[in-house]
Image: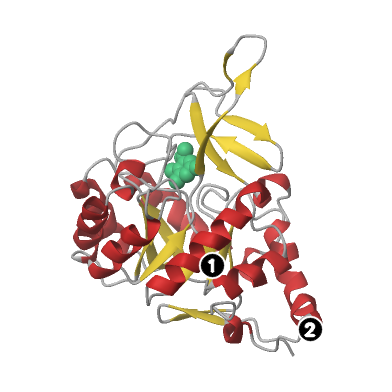
């Protein structure tokens, strides 16, 4: 019997498959499609202190084997997440979730973290210092080791829950950022967020996205994610949530071999709302084919 359980910073998941932040909302849109309790956990949409309408349209563009987004941190804001989204989620999902936090100042991250820390269903905090689609804040904290450390320390000071910091592939040296976060107290790291990209409309000669640039995700970025998870796993002694282009059970296994303890699935949810359910159902057969009895045995097994 294939054992798909993994333990992530002290909490055990039935399986390592987690819908990625921003591709699953707060769960409600997916509940009519399948029983969400099959999921290892759910990473919620990034939450900011104030509600945000997001960027102008168009803010999605298709690319070969990928997707470019410039959503701009659309979310209902911290108070509405606590008052509406989390109570609704508790009726459709019955395991600990990952609350993802974004902000425009260190204080905003800490304020959100202090409130989400008190929510019983929140098992982990994921600090998003890698959103590529806002002018200030967001990714700017994830490109500089000192800023990344400052946000991490401020969040750690107000929570007892495990803190994962979500890293940007757009940083010049992601290992330096990872080290700075762990030295500041991060319990784990999530990587990667989207890669900056752009498309141009041939007729108008203008960018396809209203915001100009966007974040590239989808199968096109899986090899980039695998490389960076591999690098960070070698450098840092903390659990890693690997993400970026994962769309199958075999991709999950590949990400774990590179060093991930758990794996998030992002764009695949937008292509097929049943993607996570399918991947979880496929895992035992993929494990059998590869002679894997316990997924936890293969974490980092491709490291030298
Ligand atoms: O909302 C977004 O535009 C967004 C976010 Br917060 C993020 O972390 N990554 C991304 O590709 N888009």
Q: CA distance from mark 1 to mark 2?
A: 23 Å
Q: Quadrant of the N terminus?
A: bottom right
Give the residue displayed 44% in from the left and 73% down from the top.
234
Establish whether ligand 1 lies closer than 8 Å to the Cβ of label 2: no
Residue 275: in sight, yes or no? yes
* Secondary structure under the numbered disc 2 in the rendered image: helix
Tell me the residue at 63%/30% (across/down).
61
Nearer the observer, 98 or 217: 217
Residue at left offset 63%, top offset 39% = 67
Residue 118 shows in this picture:
no
Placement of the C terminus among the 4 image quadrants: bottom right
Q: Which residue is mark 1?
A: 41
- Crowd around label 2: few <14 · some 14–19 · many ≥20 (10 Å): few
Direction from residue 129 to residue 58 in the image, left or right: right
Location of mark 2 (residue): 288
Element under disc 1 = loop
Residue at coordinates 50% horizontally, 52% vertically from top-left? 21
Tags 1 and 2 in contact by the CB under 8 Å rule?
A: no
Q: Estimate the x, y position of residue 192 in percent, counting from the top left.
A: 49, 55
């Amino acid at each position: 019997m294939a054992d798909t359980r993994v333990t992530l910073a002290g909490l055990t998941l039935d399986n390592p498959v987690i819908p990625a932040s921003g591709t699953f909302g707060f769960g409600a849109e997916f509940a009519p499609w399948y029983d969400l309790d099959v999921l290892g956990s759910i990473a919620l949409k990034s939450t900011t202190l104030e509600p945000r309408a997001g960027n102008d349209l168009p803010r999605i563009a298709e690319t070969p084997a990928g997707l470019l987004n410039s959503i701009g941190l659309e979310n209902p804001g911290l108070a509405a997440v606590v008052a509406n989204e989390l109570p609704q989620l508790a009726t459709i999902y019955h395991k600990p979730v990952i609350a993802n936090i974004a902000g425009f100042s260190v204080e905003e991250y800490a304020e959100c973290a202090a409130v989400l820390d008190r929510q019983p269903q929140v098992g982990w905090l994921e600090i998003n210092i890698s959103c590529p689609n806002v002018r200030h804040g967001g990714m700017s904290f994830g490109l500089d080791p000192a800023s990344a450390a400052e946000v991490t320390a401020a969040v750690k000071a107000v929570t007892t829950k495990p803190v994962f910091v979500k890293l940007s592939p757009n940083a010049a040296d992601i290992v330096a950022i990872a080290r700075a976060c762990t030295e500041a107290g991060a319990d784990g790291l999530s990587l990667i967020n989207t890669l900056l990209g752009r498309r141009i409309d041939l007729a108008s000669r203008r960018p396809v996205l209203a915001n100009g640039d966007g974040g590239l995700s989808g199968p096109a970025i899986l090899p980039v994610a695998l490389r960076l998870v591999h690098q960070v796993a070698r450098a840092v002694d903390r659990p890693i949530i690997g993400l970026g282009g994962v769309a199958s059970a075999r991709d999950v296994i590949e990400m774990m071999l590179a060093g991930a303890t758990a794996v998030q699935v992002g764009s695949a949810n937008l292509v097929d709302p049943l993607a996570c359910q399918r991947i979880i159902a496929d895992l035992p057969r993929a494990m059998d084919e590869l002679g894997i009895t316990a997924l936890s045995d293969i974490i980092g097994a491709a490291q030298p």
